[in-house]
Amino acid sequence: MSKKIAVIDYGFGNIESVLKALNFCKAQAETVNKPEALSGYGAAILPGVGSFGPAAEFLKISGFDEAVKNYVKSGKMLYGICLGFQLFFTKGFENGEHEGLDLIKGEVKKFDLKDKSLKIPHMGWNTVKTAENIYARKMFKGIEDGESFYFVHSYYALTQDVSKSSSVCDYGGDFCSSIAFENVWGSQFHPEKSGDKGLAVLTNFIKEAL
Amino acid sequence: MLGVRVIPCLDVNKGRVVKGTNFINLQDAGDPVEVAKRYNAEGADEVVFLDITASHEGRDTIADLVKKTSEQVFIPLTVGGGIRTVEDIRNILNAGADKVSLNSAAVKDPEIIRQASQRFGAQCIVVAIDAKKTAQSKWTVFVHGGRIDTQTDAVEWAKKAVSLGAGEILLTSMDKDGTKDGYDIELLKEVSKSVSVPVIASGGAGTVDHFAQACYAGASAVLAASLFHYGQLTIKEVKKYLRSKQISVRGAGNV
Protein backbone atom coordinates (compact mmCIF):
# COMPACT_ATOMS: atom_id res chain seq x y z
CA MET A 1 0.00 0.00 0.00
CA SER A 2 1.13 3.51 -0.74
CA LYS A 3 2.76 5.24 2.18
CA LYS A 4 1.69 8.62 0.90
CA ILE A 5 -1.09 10.78 2.30
CA ALA A 6 -3.42 12.66 -0.01
CA VAL A 7 -4.49 16.13 1.08
CA ILE A 8 -7.63 16.76 -0.94
CA ASP A 9 -7.52 20.12 -2.68
CA TYR A 10 -11.05 21.12 -3.61
CA GLY A 11 -10.52 24.85 -3.32
CA PHE A 12 -11.63 25.26 0.29
CA GLY A 13 -8.53 24.64 2.20
CA ASN A 14 -5.82 25.46 4.54
CA ILE A 15 -3.90 23.02 2.33
CA GLU A 16 -0.42 24.40 2.92
CA SER A 17 -0.68 24.34 6.69
CA VAL A 18 -1.87 20.75 6.63
CA LEU A 19 0.94 19.68 4.30
CA LYS A 20 3.54 21.40 6.45
CA ALA A 21 2.25 19.75 9.61
CA LEU A 22 2.24 16.30 7.97
CA ASN A 23 5.77 16.87 6.71
CA PHE A 24 6.81 17.93 10.19
CA CYS A 25 5.36 14.60 11.44
CA LYS A 26 7.63 12.92 8.90
CA ALA A 27 4.82 11.78 6.63
CA GLN A 28 4.92 12.04 2.87
CA ALA A 29 1.98 14.11 1.76
CA GLU A 30 0.76 15.57 -1.52
CA THR A 31 -2.17 17.59 -2.67
CA VAL A 32 -4.67 15.75 -4.83
CA ASN A 33 -7.08 17.67 -7.04
CA LYS A 34 -8.40 14.82 -9.19
CA PRO A 35 -10.88 12.40 -7.61
CA GLU A 36 -9.59 9.45 -9.67
CA ALA A 37 -6.10 9.89 -8.17
CA LEU A 38 -7.33 9.41 -4.60
CA SER A 39 -7.29 5.59 -4.60
CA GLY A 40 -3.53 5.61 -5.16
CA TYR A 41 -2.91 6.98 -1.66
CA GLY A 42 -2.60 5.12 1.63
CA ALA A 43 -4.59 7.71 3.58
CA ALA A 44 -6.44 10.92 2.89
CA ILE A 45 -7.19 14.21 4.59
CA LEU A 46 -10.17 16.38 3.77
CA PRO A 47 -9.27 19.87 5.00
CA GLY A 48 -11.48 22.88 4.66
CA VAL A 49 -12.10 26.47 5.50
CA GLY A 50 -15.18 28.21 4.19
CA SER A 51 -18.88 27.66 3.89
CA PHE A 52 -20.67 24.27 4.01
CA GLY A 53 -22.98 24.79 1.04
CA PRO A 54 -20.48 25.81 -1.65
CA ALA A 55 -17.97 23.21 -0.38
CA ALA A 56 -20.56 20.38 -0.50
CA GLU A 57 -21.63 21.54 -3.93
CA PHE A 58 -18.05 21.56 -5.15
CA LEU A 59 -17.42 18.05 -3.80
CA LYS A 60 -20.42 16.89 -5.80
CA ILE A 61 -19.56 18.68 -9.04
CA SER A 62 -15.92 17.61 -8.94
CA GLY A 63 -16.82 13.98 -8.23
CA PHE A 64 -14.90 14.05 -4.96
CA ASP A 65 -18.05 13.11 -3.03
CA GLU A 66 -18.23 9.65 -4.64
CA ALA A 67 -14.44 9.29 -4.61
CA VAL A 68 -14.31 9.98 -0.87
CA LYS A 69 -17.20 7.60 -0.13
CA ASN A 70 -15.56 4.84 -2.18
CA TYR A 71 -12.26 5.54 -0.49
CA VAL A 72 -13.87 5.00 2.91
CA LYS A 73 -15.56 1.80 1.67
CA SER A 74 -12.15 0.50 0.59
CA GLY A 75 -11.13 0.61 4.23
CA LYS A 76 -8.44 3.28 3.95
CA MET A 77 -8.29 5.99 6.54
CA LEU A 78 -9.76 9.44 6.12
CA TYR A 79 -9.37 12.47 8.40
CA GLY A 80 -11.54 15.58 8.05
CA ILE A 81 -10.46 18.93 9.47
CA CYS A 82 -12.83 21.78 10.41
CA LEU A 83 -15.15 22.26 7.39
CA GLY A 84 -13.84 18.92 6.03
CA PHE A 85 -15.01 17.32 9.29
CA GLN A 86 -18.39 19.07 9.08
CA LEU A 87 -18.88 17.70 5.56
CA PHE A 88 -18.82 14.15 6.99
CA PHE A 89 -22.25 14.73 8.51
CA THR A 90 -25.67 14.20 6.97
CA LYS A 91 -26.72 17.82 6.64
CA GLY A 92 -25.43 21.32 7.07
CA PHE A 93 -27.47 24.44 7.72
CA GLU A 94 -25.10 27.22 6.67
CA ASN A 95 -27.08 29.64 4.46
CA GLY A 96 -29.77 27.11 3.67
CA GLU A 97 -29.96 23.32 3.94
CA HIS A 98 -27.25 21.28 2.25
CA GLU A 99 -26.46 17.59 2.00
CA GLY A 100 -23.16 16.40 3.39
CA LEU A 101 -21.31 13.14 2.74
CA ASP A 102 -23.44 11.34 5.36
CA LEU A 103 -20.50 9.28 6.63
CA ILE A 104 -21.71 10.16 10.13
CA LYS A 105 -25.35 10.70 11.07
CA GLY A 106 -25.75 14.23 12.28
CA GLU A 107 -26.25 17.87 11.53
CA VAL A 108 -24.16 21.03 11.43
CA LYS A 109 -25.82 24.19 12.75
CA LYS A 110 -24.93 27.73 13.69
CA PHE A 111 -24.11 28.47 17.33
CA ASP A 112 -27.17 29.93 19.00
CA LEU A 113 -25.69 31.07 22.27
CA LYS A 114 -27.84 32.19 25.17
CA ASP A 115 -24.82 33.64 26.92
CA LYS A 116 -24.29 36.77 24.87
CA SER A 117 -20.81 37.31 26.31
CA LEU A 118 -19.67 34.27 24.30
CA LYS A 119 -18.27 35.45 20.99
CA ILE A 120 -18.87 34.01 17.54
CA PRO A 121 -16.77 32.62 15.93
CA HIS A 122 -15.72 30.22 18.65
CA MET A 123 -12.06 31.11 18.25
CA GLY A 124 -9.14 29.96 20.32
CA TRP A 125 -7.99 27.08 22.48
CA ASN A 126 -10.68 25.06 24.15
CA THR A 127 -10.51 21.89 26.22
CA VAL A 128 -12.07 18.65 24.97
CA LYS A 129 -13.47 15.69 26.88
CA THR A 130 -12.30 12.52 25.21
CA ALA A 131 -14.62 9.53 24.90
CA GLU A 132 -13.96 6.10 26.39
CA ASN A 133 -13.84 3.85 23.40
CA ILE A 134 -11.17 2.07 21.41
CA TYR A 135 -11.06 4.59 18.54
CA ALA A 136 -11.01 7.63 20.81
CA ARG A 137 -8.11 6.06 22.68
CA LYS A 138 -6.24 5.57 19.41
CA MET A 139 -6.89 9.13 18.28
CA PHE A 140 -5.85 10.72 21.58
CA LYS A 141 -3.11 8.26 22.48
CA GLY A 142 -0.48 9.98 24.62
CA ILE A 143 -2.74 13.01 25.19
CA GLU A 144 -4.33 13.62 28.56
CA ASP A 145 -8.07 14.15 28.87
CA GLY A 146 -8.90 17.85 29.10
CA GLU A 147 -6.16 19.09 26.80
CA SER A 148 -6.76 22.18 24.65
CA PHE A 149 -6.99 22.36 20.88
CA TYR A 150 -7.34 25.30 18.50
CA PHE A 151 -10.83 26.00 17.17
CA VAL A 152 -12.19 28.60 14.81
CA HIS A 153 -15.76 28.10 13.63
CA SER A 154 -19.27 29.52 13.80
CA TYR A 155 -21.11 26.25 13.06
CA TYR A 156 -20.99 23.10 15.16
CA ALA A 157 -21.82 19.44 14.68
CA LEU A 158 -24.09 17.19 16.70
CA THR A 159 -24.31 13.47 15.99
CA GLN A 160 -26.82 10.75 16.73
CA ASP A 161 -23.97 8.22 16.34
CA VAL A 162 -22.73 8.91 19.84
CA SER A 163 -20.47 5.86 19.74
CA LYS A 164 -18.55 7.45 16.87
CA SER A 165 -17.84 10.65 18.75
CA SER A 166 -14.30 10.68 20.13
CA SER A 167 -14.52 13.96 22.02
CA VAL A 168 -16.90 16.74 22.97
CA CYS A 169 -16.20 20.40 23.63
CA ASP A 170 -18.25 22.89 25.62
CA TYR A 171 -19.07 26.30 24.16
CA GLY A 172 -22.40 27.37 25.56
CA GLY A 173 -23.23 23.63 25.52
CA ASP A 174 -21.49 20.46 24.37
CA PHE A 175 -20.87 19.87 20.67
CA CYS A 176 -19.07 17.09 18.81
CA SER A 177 -15.41 18.18 18.60
CA SER A 178 -14.09 15.03 16.97
CA ILE A 179 -15.09 11.67 15.64
CA ALA A 180 -13.19 8.42 15.27
CA PHE A 181 -14.84 5.23 14.13
CA GLU A 182 -13.05 2.53 12.21
CA ASN A 183 -11.37 4.37 9.33
CA VAL A 184 -13.25 7.67 9.53
CA TRP A 185 -11.63 10.25 11.78
CA GLY A 186 -12.02 13.99 11.94
CA SER A 187 -12.00 17.01 14.18
CA GLN A 188 -13.63 20.41 14.41
CA PHE A 189 -10.36 21.67 15.88
CA HIS A 190 -7.31 22.23 13.70
CA PRO A 191 -4.69 19.61 14.62
CA GLU A 192 -2.24 21.43 12.34
CA LYS A 193 -2.60 24.57 14.47
CA SER A 194 -2.89 22.98 17.91
CA GLY A 195 0.79 22.85 18.78
CA ASP A 196 2.32 19.65 20.13
CA LYS A 197 -1.02 18.07 21.03
CA GLY A 198 -2.37 18.64 17.54
CA LEU A 199 0.75 17.16 15.98
CA ALA A 200 0.31 14.17 18.32
CA VAL A 201 -3.22 13.59 16.97
CA LEU A 202 -1.89 13.75 13.40
CA THR A 203 0.93 11.36 14.28
CA ASN A 204 -1.61 8.94 15.80
CA PHE A 205 -3.58 9.12 12.55
CA ILE A 206 -0.49 8.53 10.42
CA LYS A 207 0.55 5.53 12.54
CA GLU A 208 -2.92 4.04 12.36
CA ALA A 209 -3.25 4.64 8.63
CA LEU A 210 0.09 3.58 7.18
CA MET B 1 -13.40 26.03 28.75
CA LEU B 2 -12.29 28.41 26.05
CA GLY B 3 -9.04 29.97 27.21
CA VAL B 4 -8.05 33.59 26.95
CA ARG B 5 -5.26 33.74 24.37
CA VAL B 6 -1.93 35.24 25.33
CA ILE B 7 -0.29 36.64 22.21
CA PRO B 8 3.23 37.97 21.77
CA CYS B 9 3.65 40.47 18.94
CA LEU B 10 6.92 40.65 17.00
CA ASP B 11 7.86 43.82 15.18
CA VAL B 12 9.59 42.76 12.00
CA ASN B 13 11.77 45.04 9.87
CA LYS B 14 13.31 43.69 6.64
CA GLY B 15 13.01 40.13 7.87
CA ARG B 16 14.43 40.64 11.37
CA VAL B 17 12.77 41.11 14.73
CA VAL B 18 13.44 44.61 15.98
CA LYS B 19 13.05 46.35 19.29
CA GLY B 20 12.61 50.06 19.66
CA THR B 21 10.07 52.68 20.52
CA ASN B 22 7.95 54.50 17.99
CA PHE B 23 9.99 53.24 15.07
CA ILE B 24 13.09 55.00 16.42
CA ASN B 25 16.33 53.41 17.61
CA LEU B 26 15.49 50.03 16.14
CA GLN B 27 17.75 47.30 17.41
CA ASP B 28 18.13 43.85 15.97
CA ALA B 29 16.49 41.26 18.21
CA GLY B 30 16.90 38.09 16.24
CA ASP B 31 15.46 35.80 13.63
CA PRO B 32 11.65 35.86 13.71
CA VAL B 33 11.44 32.11 13.10
CA GLU B 34 13.60 31.40 16.14
CA VAL B 35 11.78 33.95 18.29
CA ALA B 36 8.40 32.49 17.24
CA LYS B 37 9.66 28.99 18.11
CA ARG B 38 10.74 30.18 21.52
CA TYR B 39 7.39 31.83 22.22
CA ASN B 40 5.63 28.67 21.08
CA ALA B 41 7.71 26.62 23.52
CA GLU B 42 6.85 29.11 26.29
CA GLY B 43 3.13 28.57 25.72
CA ALA B 44 2.09 31.40 23.41
CA ASP B 45 -1.39 30.72 22.03
CA GLU B 46 -0.77 32.60 18.82
CA VAL B 47 1.96 34.76 17.33
CA VAL B 48 1.56 38.11 15.56
CA PHE B 49 4.13 39.44 13.11
CA LEU B 50 3.80 43.16 12.58
CA ASP B 51 5.78 44.14 9.51
CA ILE B 52 7.11 47.65 9.99
CA THR B 53 9.36 47.59 6.93
CA ALA B 54 9.14 51.02 5.43
CA SER B 55 10.57 50.42 1.98
CA HIS B 56 8.62 48.60 -0.65
CA GLU B 57 11.57 46.36 -1.63
CA GLY B 58 11.81 44.95 1.86
CA ARG B 59 8.26 43.72 1.80
CA ASP B 60 8.73 40.45 -0.05
CA THR B 61 10.75 39.16 2.86
CA ILE B 62 7.68 38.95 5.11
CA ALA B 63 6.05 36.29 2.91
CA ASP B 64 9.24 34.26 2.93
CA LEU B 65 9.43 34.62 6.68
CA VAL B 66 5.83 33.50 7.12
CA LYS B 67 6.57 30.43 5.00
CA LYS B 68 9.60 29.46 7.09
CA THR B 69 7.77 30.05 10.36
CA SER B 70 4.74 28.03 9.37
CA GLU B 71 6.98 25.07 8.54
CA GLN B 72 8.16 24.94 12.13
CA VAL B 73 5.59 26.55 14.38
CA PHE B 74 2.16 24.94 14.53
CA ILE B 75 0.07 27.54 16.29
CA PRO B 76 -1.93 30.32 14.60
CA LEU B 77 0.10 33.06 12.98
CA THR B 78 -1.32 36.52 12.24
CA VAL B 79 0.47 38.95 9.96
CA GLY B 80 -0.15 42.68 9.85
CA GLY B 81 1.50 45.83 8.59
CA GLY B 82 1.46 47.25 5.12
CA ILE B 83 -1.21 44.95 3.72
CA ARG B 84 -3.10 46.98 1.12
CA THR B 85 -4.89 44.74 -1.36
CA VAL B 86 -6.79 41.48 -1.59
CA GLU B 87 -3.79 40.20 -3.55
CA ASP B 88 -1.47 41.06 -0.63
CA ILE B 89 -3.80 39.10 1.65
CA ARG B 90 -3.79 36.11 -0.68
CA ASN B 91 0.02 36.09 -0.81
CA ILE B 92 0.39 36.19 2.95
CA LEU B 93 -2.25 33.48 3.52
CA ASN B 94 -0.71 31.29 0.81
CA ALA B 95 2.66 31.67 2.48
CA GLY B 96 1.15 30.04 5.57
CA ALA B 97 -0.37 32.79 7.72
CA ASP B 98 -3.69 31.93 9.36
CA LYS B 99 -4.94 35.48 9.61
CA VAL B 100 -4.08 38.87 8.27
CA SER B 101 -4.55 42.09 10.12
CA LEU B 102 -5.77 45.13 8.20
CA ASN B 103 -5.37 48.64 9.53
CA SER B 104 -4.89 51.76 7.37
CA ALA B 105 -5.99 50.01 4.18
CA ALA B 106 -9.34 49.09 5.74
CA VAL B 107 -9.94 52.63 6.94
CA LYS B 108 -9.10 53.98 3.50
CA ASP B 109 -11.32 51.49 1.72
CA PRO B 110 -13.62 49.50 4.03
CA GLU B 111 -14.76 47.41 1.05
CA ILE B 112 -11.50 45.47 1.29
CA ILE B 113 -12.86 43.90 4.50
CA ARG B 114 -15.94 42.64 2.70
CA GLN B 115 -14.02 41.40 -0.32
CA ALA B 116 -11.37 39.63 1.74
CA SER B 117 -13.91 38.15 4.13
CA GLN B 118 -16.03 36.78 1.30
CA ARG B 119 -13.03 35.33 -0.47
CA PHE B 120 -11.02 33.90 2.43
CA GLY B 121 -13.55 33.67 5.27
CA ALA B 122 -14.16 36.01 8.19
CA GLN B 123 -12.02 33.83 10.44
CA CYS B 124 -8.81 35.05 8.81
CA ILE B 125 -9.63 38.75 8.61
CA VAL B 126 -8.57 40.76 11.64
CA VAL B 127 -9.19 44.49 11.66
CA ALA B 128 -6.62 46.38 13.72
CA ILE B 129 -7.80 49.64 15.25
CA ASP B 130 -5.42 52.21 16.72
CA ALA B 131 -7.60 54.32 18.96
CA LYS B 132 -6.86 57.51 20.85
CA LYS B 133 -9.02 59.14 23.48
CA THR B 134 -10.21 62.55 22.28
CA ALA B 135 -12.93 63.33 24.79
CA GLN B 136 -14.72 61.75 27.75
CA SER B 137 -15.67 58.18 26.68
CA LYS B 138 -14.78 58.98 23.10
CA TRP B 139 -11.99 57.57 21.01
CA THR B 140 -11.06 58.20 17.40
CA VAL B 141 -9.23 56.02 14.92
CA PHE B 142 -5.66 56.89 13.98
CA VAL B 143 -3.79 55.47 11.00
CA HIS B 144 -0.26 55.35 9.64
CA GLY B 145 1.35 54.34 12.88
CA GLY B 146 -0.76 56.76 14.86
CA ARG B 147 0.24 59.83 12.89
CA ILE B 148 -3.03 60.65 11.19
CA ASP B 149 -6.34 61.28 12.96
CA THR B 150 -9.20 60.02 10.81
CA GLN B 151 -11.77 61.59 13.17
CA THR B 152 -13.73 58.37 12.91
CA ASP B 153 -15.29 57.10 16.13
CA ALA B 154 -13.44 53.93 17.18
CA VAL B 155 -16.46 52.08 18.55
CA GLU B 156 -18.51 52.86 15.44
CA TRP B 157 -15.64 51.78 13.22
CA ALA B 158 -15.32 48.48 15.09
CA LYS B 159 -19.04 47.81 14.56
CA LYS B 160 -18.79 48.69 10.89
CA ALA B 161 -15.71 46.50 10.40
CA VAL B 162 -17.55 43.53 11.91
CA SER B 163 -20.65 44.17 9.80
CA LEU B 164 -18.39 44.11 6.73
CA GLY B 165 -16.94 40.75 7.72
CA ALA B 166 -14.08 41.20 10.20
CA GLY B 167 -13.70 38.03 12.27
CA GLU B 168 -11.75 39.68 15.04
CA ILE B 169 -10.74 43.15 16.28
CA LEU B 170 -7.20 43.93 17.37
CA LEU B 171 -7.68 47.00 19.54
CA THR B 172 -4.67 49.14 20.41
CA SER B 173 -4.85 52.13 22.66
CA MET B 174 -2.49 54.79 21.34
CA ASP B 175 -2.61 56.54 24.70
CA LYS B 176 -1.51 53.46 26.59
CA ASP B 177 0.86 51.94 24.07
CA GLY B 178 4.39 51.89 25.48
CA THR B 179 3.38 53.28 28.88
CA LYS B 180 3.21 49.95 30.73
CA ASP B 181 0.51 51.32 33.02
CA GLY B 182 -2.28 49.06 31.83
CA TYR B 183 -4.64 48.56 28.91
CA ASP B 184 -7.34 51.18 28.26
CA ILE B 185 -10.05 49.28 30.12
CA GLU B 186 -12.87 51.67 29.34
CA LEU B 187 -12.16 51.50 25.59
CA LEU B 188 -11.91 47.73 25.77
CA LYS B 189 -15.26 47.44 27.55
CA GLU B 190 -16.97 49.71 25.04
CA VAL B 191 -15.69 47.90 21.96
CA SER B 192 -16.05 44.41 23.41
CA LYS B 193 -19.72 44.90 24.32
CA SER B 194 -20.43 46.52 20.94
CA VAL B 195 -19.23 43.68 18.70
CA SER B 196 -20.03 39.97 18.50
CA VAL B 197 -16.52 38.90 17.48
CA PRO B 198 -13.45 38.39 19.70
CA VAL B 199 -11.46 41.48 20.71
CA ILE B 200 -7.69 41.38 21.28
CA ALA B 201 -6.48 43.89 23.86
CA SER B 202 -3.27 45.70 22.94
CA GLY B 203 -1.21 48.59 24.27
CA GLY B 204 -0.17 49.28 27.82
CA ALA B 205 0.47 45.91 29.48
CA GLY B 206 3.10 46.23 32.19
CA THR B 207 2.15 43.83 34.98
CA VAL B 208 0.43 40.45 35.23
CA ASP B 209 -2.61 42.13 36.72
CA HIS B 210 -3.05 44.33 33.64
CA PHE B 211 -3.71 41.15 31.64
CA ALA B 212 -6.37 40.06 34.14
CA GLN B 213 -8.04 43.49 34.00
CA ALA B 214 -8.28 43.21 30.22
CA CYS B 215 -9.94 39.82 30.54
CA TYR B 216 -12.49 41.20 33.02
CA ALA B 217 -13.21 43.99 30.51
CA GLY B 218 -14.20 41.43 27.89
CA ALA B 219 -11.00 40.78 25.92
CA SER B 220 -10.84 37.34 24.28
CA ALA B 221 -7.10 37.68 23.88
CA VAL B 222 -4.33 39.81 25.35
CA LEU B 223 -1.36 41.01 23.34
CA ALA B 224 1.98 42.45 24.34
CA ALA B 225 5.21 43.13 22.49
CA SER B 226 8.10 44.78 24.33
CA LEU B 227 7.11 43.31 27.67
CA PHE B 228 7.80 39.82 26.36
CA HIS B 229 10.73 40.87 24.14
CA TYR B 230 12.66 42.35 27.03
CA GLY B 231 11.81 39.42 29.26
CA GLN B 232 10.13 41.66 31.83
CA LEU B 233 7.39 39.07 31.98
CA THR B 234 7.20 35.61 30.44
CA ILE B 235 4.11 34.12 28.87
CA LYS B 236 4.20 31.46 31.56
CA GLU B 237 4.11 34.05 34.34
CA VAL B 238 1.12 35.76 32.75
CA LYS B 239 -0.75 32.48 32.35
CA LYS B 240 0.05 31.36 35.86
CA TYR B 241 -1.35 34.61 37.26
CA LEU B 242 -4.49 34.47 35.10
CA ARG B 243 -5.09 30.91 36.25
CA SER B 244 -4.72 32.01 39.87
CA LYS B 245 -7.51 34.50 39.15
CA GLN B 246 -9.75 31.71 37.78
CA ILE B 247 -9.33 32.95 34.23
CA SER B 248 -9.15 30.02 31.87
CA VAL B 249 -5.92 29.70 29.87
CA ARG B 250 -4.44 26.90 27.82
CA GLY B 251 -1.78 24.68 29.35
CA ALA B 252 -1.98 26.40 32.70
CA GLY B 253 -1.79 23.04 34.39
CA ASN B 254 1.71 22.64 33.02
CA VAL B 255 3.19 26.02 33.78
Image (cartoon, grey):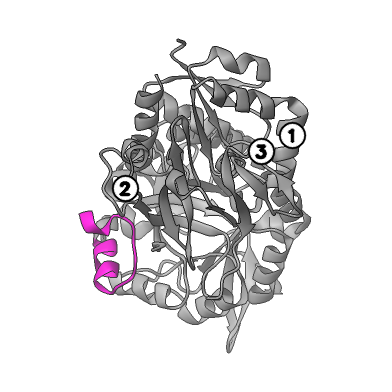
Task: Give me the C-alpha separation between circle 2 and circle 1.
Answer: 35 Å
The image position of residue B77, as x and y in percent, is 48, 45
The image position of residue B100, as x and y in percent, is 59, 48
Amino acid type, residue under disc 3 in the picture: Arg
A24 relative to B237 in the view: left or right:
right
Query: Which of the 4 quarters of the picture holds residue B246?
Result: bottom left
Q: Which residue is mark 1?
A: A58
Q: Is disc 1 placed on a helix, strand or loop?
A: helix
> Which chain does the numbered disc 1 sit on?
A
Q: Are marks 3 and 2 in contact (CB under 8 Å)?
A: no
The image position of residue A150, as x and y in percent, is 44, 50
Q: Residues within 10 Å of mark 1 (few under 14, many from 20)?
A: some
Same subunit under labels 3 and 1? no
> Which chain does the numbered disc 3 sit on?
B
**Residue at image location 55% in from the left, 12% down from the top:** A40
The image position of residue B165, as x and y in percent, is 70, 58
Q: Nearer the viewer, mark 3 or mark 1?
A: 1
Q: Is disc 3 placed on a helix, strand or loop?
A: helix
Amino acid type, residue under disc 2 in the picture: Glu
**Residue at image location 33% in from the left, 43% down from the top:** A133
Q: Earlier in the sequence, mark 2 or mark 1?
A: 1
Kindly give the residue lying farthest to the bottom in the view shown.
B136
Q: Residues within 10 Å of mark 2 (few under 14, many from 20)?
A: few
Q: Is residue B93 magenta?
A: no
Query: Which of the 4 quarters of the picture holds residue B59?
Result: top right
Q: Please give the range of residues in magenta.
A: B237-255
Q: Nearer the viewer, mark 2 or mark 1?
A: 2
Q: Which residue is mark 2?
A: A132
